[in-house]
């Protein structure tokens, strides 16, 4: 049986790791959105539509596969990607309206 003191020490270490992963995720998302905003500006300048359903479908299949190989729930990965895609499309629409 684990003592409370040992459990608290381990919990602290787990939380430190989680905090590091959260920070990395935020920085990676920021970089991703910098690139997708550039894509939105390019699409707007070329009068291309803000969304690309075929590309989005390909990405969902690709990320579901990546999730499976990483032992992550593919449904969660798809929901997360759909959330990101909605935000990206909103940015592209904003770029097109400028």
Image (cartoon, grey):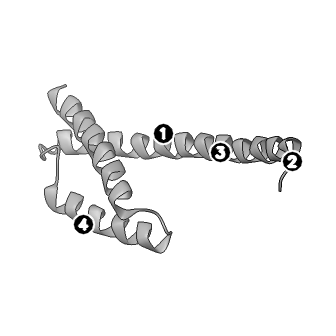
Report the residue at 20% width, 45% height from top.
43
Q: Which residue is mark 2?
A: 3
Crowd rating for badge 1 (residues with CA inside 10 Å; few <14, some 14–19, many 20+): few
User: Residue 72 or 90: which is nearer the viewer?
Assistant: 72
Q: Secondary structure at mark 4?
A: helix
Say whether disc 2 or disc 4 marks the residue closer to the N-terminus.
2
Quarter assignment of residue 59: bottom left
Left or right position of 64 against 26: left
Name the residue nearer the viewer: 36 or 27: 27
Tag shown at residue 30: 1
Q: Earlier in the sequence, mark 3 or mark 1?
A: 3
Q: Secondary structure at mark 1?
A: helix
Dot 1 or dot 4, earlier in sequence: 1
Q: Are marks 2 and 4 in contact (CB under 8 Å)?
A: no
Residue depicted at 23% across the width and 41% down the height: 89
Q: Residues within 10 Å of mark 3 (few under 14, many from 20)?
A: few
Q: Secondary structure at mark 3?
A: helix
Residue 73: mark: none
> Marks 2/4: CA distance?
49 Å
User: Where's residue 86, x and y in %?
Assistant: 25, 41
- Tell me how far mark 1 sits from mark 4, CA to CA: 22 Å
Q: Depth-wise, is mark 3 or mark 1 nearer the camera?
A: 3
| Left or right side of 68 for 53 | left
Distance (Cα) linking label 3 and label 4 = 30 Å
Residue 18 marker: 3
Looking at this view, is 22 or 15 the one in front?
A: 15
Mark 3 or 4: the one toward you? 3
**Where does residue 83 sit, x and y in percent of width and height?**
30, 43
Q: Quadrant of the C terminus?
A: top left
Disc 4: which residue: 58
Q: Looking at the picture, how far across and down is residue 72, in whole percent? A: 46, 63
């Amino acid at each position: 049986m684990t003592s409370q003191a040992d459990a608290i020490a381990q919990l602290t270490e787990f939380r430190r790791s989680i905090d590091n992963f959260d920070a990395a995720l935020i920085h990676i998302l920021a970089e991703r959105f910098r690139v997708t905003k550039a894509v939105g500006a390019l699409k707007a300048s070329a009068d291309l539509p803000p969304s690309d359903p075929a590309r989005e479908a390909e990405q969902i299949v690709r990320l579901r596969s990546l999730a499976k190989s990483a032992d992550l729930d593919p449904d969660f990965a798809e929901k997360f990607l759909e959330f990101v895609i909605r935000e990206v499309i909103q940015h592209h629409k904003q770029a097109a309206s400028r």
